[in-house]
Amino acid sequence: MHTINTILDLRRHLDMCRAAERTVGLVPTMGALHEGHASLVRRSVKENDVTVVSIFLNPTQFNDPKDLERYPRTLEADCRLLESCGGDVVAFVPRVSEMYPDPDLRHFSYPPTDSVMEGAFRPGHFNGVCQIVSKLFTYVMPDRAYFGEKDYQQIAVIRRMVADLEFRLQIVPCPVVRDESGLAMSSRNSLLTPEERALAANIYRVLKESIVLGATVRDTHDYVVNTLNAIPGLEVQYYNIVDGDSLADVSEWDEAEHVVGCITVYCGATPIRLIDHIRYK
Ligand code: PAF
């Protein structure tokens, strides 16, 4: 594993790799790496000759400055975790001034995919994600880019952007990695106290229970929201049962080929915002 900090050095290195016909995988991250990220890196190492892991806390995707301020920063531990993944891995760790020498004035809009759920509650979030991910795709020109399915909506938005901008690469969605309690791994989990972690485990438990209810879409929705809201310390911000491709709401199970429930819950005193999802079909 070695570290590169500038776009110029990254491009030079990758030009040499491509000249030697080596394939390139990209794992975009904001650091605070955990086992979920490690699973993406290991998959990329298996499927590509070179893996670029970007570690960049992207300011343009945070609509709440407090959220950006308290986002965990753990670069040394991140590098150790990347070392442990083996393979030919480059950590790309640019400064903000490197990625944004000038304000990025581009505006991306892919409704309804980017306007519902996270898009509605975090205005500008997906615009910032598209800004940074499009820059990374342009600089790295990966053959494959790996994203965790925990951020289910993010993958749907990035797919739309890839089609729109005609990037020639494959998006590889990777399964959610969960801890033993079922809690989806997230960099934000490190901000939870042990008691809040135990509370947060209820999210996936209740989502799983809702599959076996065999109820209507409306009743399934209400079961998830009411059960979680009844637990002190948890508050559901939204629970949308949607077409798994367009992310438009569904009111009947047979309205779409894939149906997914996407949830965001506030957990604990701070509170920490946690997202998860479940596939119904
Ligand atoms: O999923 C994330 O960590 C971020 O949204 C991403 C894709 C690295 C862009 O900053």
Image (cartoon, rainbow, N blue to C red):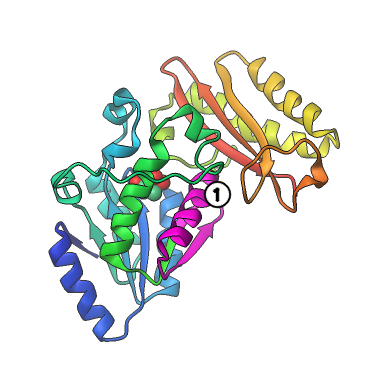
182 left or right of 215? left
Q: Position of residue 256 (x, y in %)?
A: 75, 49
Give the answer, above or below, for where 121 lies relative to 125: above
Location of residue 85 by image quarter: bottom left
Q: Position of residue 51 (x, y in %)?
A: 33, 67
Q: What's under tag 1, amino acid-wise?
A: Val
Q: Position of residue 17 (x, y in %)?
A: 25, 79
Answer yes or no: is residue 33 visible.
no
Query: In the depicted view, which residue is nearer to us: 281 or 187?
Result: 281
Taking the magenta stretch, the answer to whether it contains residue 171 is yes
Q: What residue is at 53 percent from the left and 42 percent from the top?
A: 111
Q: What residue is at 32 percent from the left and 54 percent from the top?
A: 81
Q: What residue is at 23 percent from the left and 46 percent from the top?
A: 75
Taking the magenta stretch, the answer to whether it contains residue 156 is yes
Magenta residues? 147-176
> Local crowd at mark 1 within 10 Å, few (<14), some, or many (≥20)?
many
Q: What residue is at 80 percent from the left and 27 percent from the top?
A: 219
Give the answer, above or below, for where 44 lies relative to 114: below
Mark 1 sits on what residue? 176
Query: In the depicted view, which residue is nearer to us: 261 or 160?
Result: 160
Q: Secondary structure at mark 1?
A: loop
